[in-house]
Amino acid sequence: MAEDRAFVLDLGERLIAFGDVPGRDRDAMIARDRAVIAAVLDGESGADATILVAVDDDGRPLGFIHLTTADDYYSNSVTAHVADVVVARAAEGRGVGAALLAAAEDWARARRFTLLTLNVFTANHRARALYERLGFAEEWIRCIKRLG
């Protein structure tokens, strides 16, 4: 649906609403996220991926979740993966993120995955707290060193 596509792509900036990521170009991050999400919406991603949109009782969109798969190195298997979960500013604090993550679990279980993974920026404290409340456990931290 064209309205959902516009809504989802317009929420691109919310992916880094928690603040700038040191060493990363904000506009480039938003552009990359939008391009990847647009490819899924347009059926051009070439991956087992989907976008689910949360709506209120009147059908107004509240947020979305981008689901795909990822490789789990240690089990040498494919897992379900939350690539993005975004809630519109006006819908914050209403349980939309939790509902989207519950839908992600349903999506993963329906495909017989045994793991659901996600990545989160260390500075995104609000998201990390939500994930912890919902049973996600931090397993490892990715470290980077910029080589000039």
Image (cartoon, helix red, strand yellow):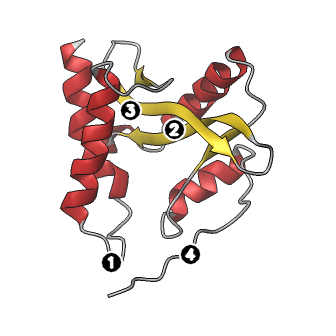
Query: Could you tell me if the residues under marks 3 and 2 are in contact, i.e. CB atoms within 8 Å?
Result: yes
Mark 1 lies on a secondary structure that is loop
The amino acid pointed to by label 1 is: Gly
x then y, percent, for residue 137: 74, 54
Q: In this rendering, would 115 be left or right of 123?
A: right
Determine the residue positioned at 40% across, 19% down: 56
Position of 35 relative to 107 (above/below): below
The amino acid pointed to by label 4 is: Cys
The amino acid pointed to by label 3 is: Gly
Rounded to the nearest angstrom, the CA distance separating label 4 from label 2 is 27 Å
Q: Residues within 10 Å of mark 3 (few under 14, many from 20)?
A: many
Rounded to the nearest angstrom, the CA distance separating label 3 from label 1 is 28 Å
The amino acid pointed to by label 2 is: Gly
Q: Residues within 10 Å of mark 1 (few under 14, many from 20)?
A: few
Which residue is tagged 3? 63
Rounded to the nearest angstrom, the CA distance separating label 4 from label 3 is 29 Å
Which residue is tagged 1? 23
Residue 105's image quarter?
top right
Rounded to the nearest angstrom, the CA distance separating label 3 from label 2 is 8 Å
x then y, percent, for residue 31: 21, 49
Mark 4 lies on a secondary structure that is loop
Which residue is tagged 2? 97
